[in-house]
Image: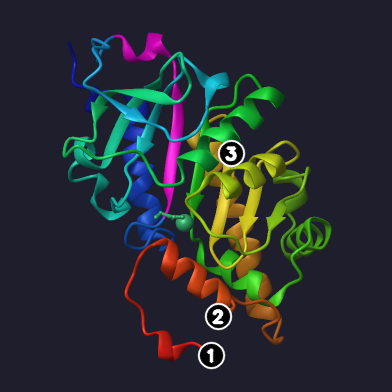
Amino acid sequence: MDTILNAPFMVELINTCTNMYRLGWNERNGGNISMRIDEVDLKPYLDFQPLRRIDLRFDAKPLAGIIFAVTGTGKYFKNVEYDPALNLGIIRIRPDGTNADVLWGFSDGGRPTSELPSHLRSHIARLSKDSEHRVVMHCHSTNTLAMTYVHPLDDKQFTRTLWQMSTECIVVFPEGIGDLPWMLCGNDEIGRATARKMEDYRLCIWAQHGIFGAGRTLDETFGLIETVEKSAEIYIKTMKGPIINTITDSELRILAEAFKVDYRKDFLE
Ligand code: 2HA
Ligand code: ZN
């Protein structure tokens, strides 16, 4: 059996993580990717023996039986190229939809990305529109994020500004881009909200956080995010306006408490 690290889809996934890190979109453990893989493409590399089972902590029944390569929770894109089996994993959703078998990777006993609800719910939404859909990608692309502080958060207005900032945009994402206000990340609520946007768009902004993209290939998905990021960069470079949206003190409290960090409470109003 050939090593899975030679599989073309794994080479591309690893290179994509490295590339995104170098673009500054995936600082520390920021960002995550999930990619649907066909059993036939895995056959030369895997015997499909489950290594262990993980509780997904939500119901992904429409994806039962589907195999995904996923980045690991808490893992750094920076490190994927040096130890893919530690930082990535391959899972298959079990028939019950609430558990998954690990088929490869997560070698330190790790789990898939904390944003798995948003990924799997987005896969369900995109697959209902396009049977060839495969990839969901999340990152913290800098100018896109900056734009969410100075631009109204509204699908129509945000899309129109991006379309105006670079000629390519209306051609690359003619359906537009969805916008979510700041929400606590890593849970099923933001997953449901993201998936609702993914019914209409392949792109969804998470205000003051980042972006989600979906596509048939890594190239298509990366290209969507790259095009938005370029256009957002032009916007940030050409407009000089006040900050109109930010993460409020009460949202910072919600965040710090959800992630159980001991923060300087006296630094908030
Ligand atoms: O920790 O990007 O949204 C990875 C993330 C959370
Ligand atoms: Zn994130």
Mark 1 / mark 2, whichever is N-terminal:
2
Mark 3 / mark 2, whichever is N-terminal:
3
Image quarter of the N terminus: top left
Q: Are marks 3 and 2 in contact (CB under 8 Å)?
A: no
Q: Nearer the viewer, residue 108 or 255?
A: 255
Residue 58 in picture, x, y percent from top left: 49, 33
Q: Nearer the viewer, residue 241 or 246?
A: 246
Of tags 1 and 3, the one toward the viewer is: 1
Q: Quadrant of residue 210?
A: bottom right
Residue 219 in picture, x, y percent from top left: 51, 38
Query: What residue does disc 1 label?
Result: 269
Q: Determine whether 180 is above or below 256 in the image.
A: above
Q: Nearer the viewer, residue 218 or 95?
A: 95
For the magenta stretch, what is the residue range? 31-43
Question: Residue at point 26% right, 45% down?
Answer: 80
Q: Amino acid at mark 3?
A: Ala
Q: Is mark 2 within 8 Å of ligand 1?
A: no
Q: Determine whether 147 is above or below 163 in the image.
A: below
What SS does tag 2 mark?
Answer: helix
Of tags 3 and 2, the one toward the viewer is: 2
Q: Residue 249: which numbered mark, if any? A: 2
Residue 56 in picture, x, y percent from top left: 41, 32
What SS does tag 3 mark?
Answer: strand
Residue 143 in picture, x, y percent from top left: 57, 69
